Each structure stands twice: as C-alpha cells, then as structure tokens.
C-alpha cells in the first residue's frame, strides 16, 4: 500500500532512519558484542535480547525506507472554510448525540485514541472538503454508515509535535 505523506512526514522519517543508522545501530552492535563475550550463547539471555533488539532496529529501517520509496506526497489544498489536512474538526454525531473533536492527519501520524484521524479512515475521507454546518455521511462499509454534522473547523497548520507511528 502506498502511504500518503506530507513533506514534514518525509523529513521526520528521514531523520528517524538517520538516527537509527548512525546512533542506534552502533549501540546495538556493541550490546550484542558485549553480551556475546559473556560465554555460552545457548543460555545467554542478554545475547538473545540484544540480538532481537538489533534485528528490530534493522527491520524498522527497512520498513521506513520502503515506505519512503513508495510514498505519495500530499498537500493541503482546502479553502479557508473547508476541512483539510491538519485541521481540527468538531463534529456532532447524530446517532450518539455526542460532540467529538478530531484532527485530520496522514495515516503514519494517525492515532484515534489521541484524536488524530487518518485521511485514509472512513471519517477522514468523509470530512475532507466539507464546511461548517454540513451534514456528512460517513460510510464505514457497504452495509453501515452514519451521519455527522460539522460544528467547527479550526485551521491548525503545525504538525511538528506529531509523532510517526511505530509498527
């Protein structure tokens, strides 16, 4: 699957790759060497744990590099009164009679528990391009959907504090 990333996402991913290659890789190799020097490897828990952590780091590097290779760069072209990328949206859920607040972000920054909804999610797709006061149908699947009303759109441009999701 091709990830949709902003230029900021790409920069953050490149910085993480560089940190993992230049800093963490060296530390983890040293940890493996240190653990190996403690003797019998078949019963050496430190060695197995260090090796596992080193492999996890290498796997993350490959994952991020593959993501960058296949990524699609997206930009926010929404008008001032429309829901767009990195905007905070206050919505009224008719079925639940509740008001919820979300920020629309790229999928690598999505974290629904923290109020960050991906542009790839059903609610993210449905809200993009709509305005305050619009009643929007959120299609979850072919059999189910629900309506929400957009109460407020807040233009929040900064994504500096957002973290790239780990796997």
Image (spheres, helix red, strand yellow):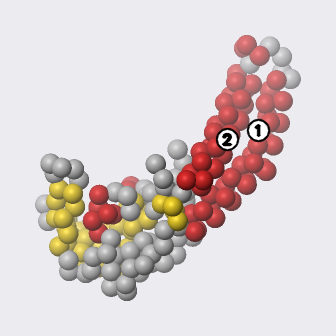
Q: Which mark is residue 28?
A: 1
Return the x and y of residue 28 as percentages of the image width and height: 76, 38
Question: In this rendering, does residue 109 appear at all?
Answer: no
Dot 2: element? helix
Return the x and y of residue 39 as percentages of the image width and height: 83, 16
Query: Which residue shows up at 20% across the image and 69% down it?
Result: 136
Q: Quadrant of residue 146?
A: bottom left
Picture layout, residue 30 above or below residue 42: below
Report which residue position mark 2 lands on.
57
Query: Which residue shows up at 67% across the image and 41% down it?
Result: 57
Report the front residue among 43 and 142: 142
Picture layout, residue 45 above or below residue 42: below
Question: In this rendering, does residue 103 appear at all?
Answer: yes
Return the x and y of residue 108 as percentages of the image width and height: 49, 56
Report the front residue among 137 and 152: 137
Q: Quadrant of residue 30?
A: top right
Query: Which residue shows up at 62% across the image and 57% down it?
Result: 13
Badges 2 and 1: C-beta atoms under 8 Å apart? yes
């Amino acid at each position: 699957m091709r990830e949709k990333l902003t230029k900021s996402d790409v920069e953050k991913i490149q910085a993480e790759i560089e940190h993992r290659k230049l800093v963490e890789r060296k530390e983890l190799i040293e940890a493996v060497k240190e653990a190996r020097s403690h003797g019998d490897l078949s019963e050496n828990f430190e060695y197995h744990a260090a090796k596992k952590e080193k492999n996890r780091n290498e796997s993350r590097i490959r994952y991020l590099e593959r993501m960058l290779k296949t990524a699609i760069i997206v930009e926010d072209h929404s008008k001032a009164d429309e829901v767009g990328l990195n905007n905070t949206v206050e919505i009224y859920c008719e079925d639940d009679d509740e008001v919820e607040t979300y920020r629309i972000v790229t999928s690598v920054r999505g974290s629904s528990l923290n109020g960050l909804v991906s542009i790839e999610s059903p609610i993210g797709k449905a809200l993009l391009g709509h305005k305050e006061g619009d009643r929007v149908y959120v299609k979850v699947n072919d059999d189910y959907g629900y309506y929400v009303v957009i109460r407020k759109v807040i233009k929040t441009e900064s994504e500096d504090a957002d973290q790239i999701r780990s796997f």
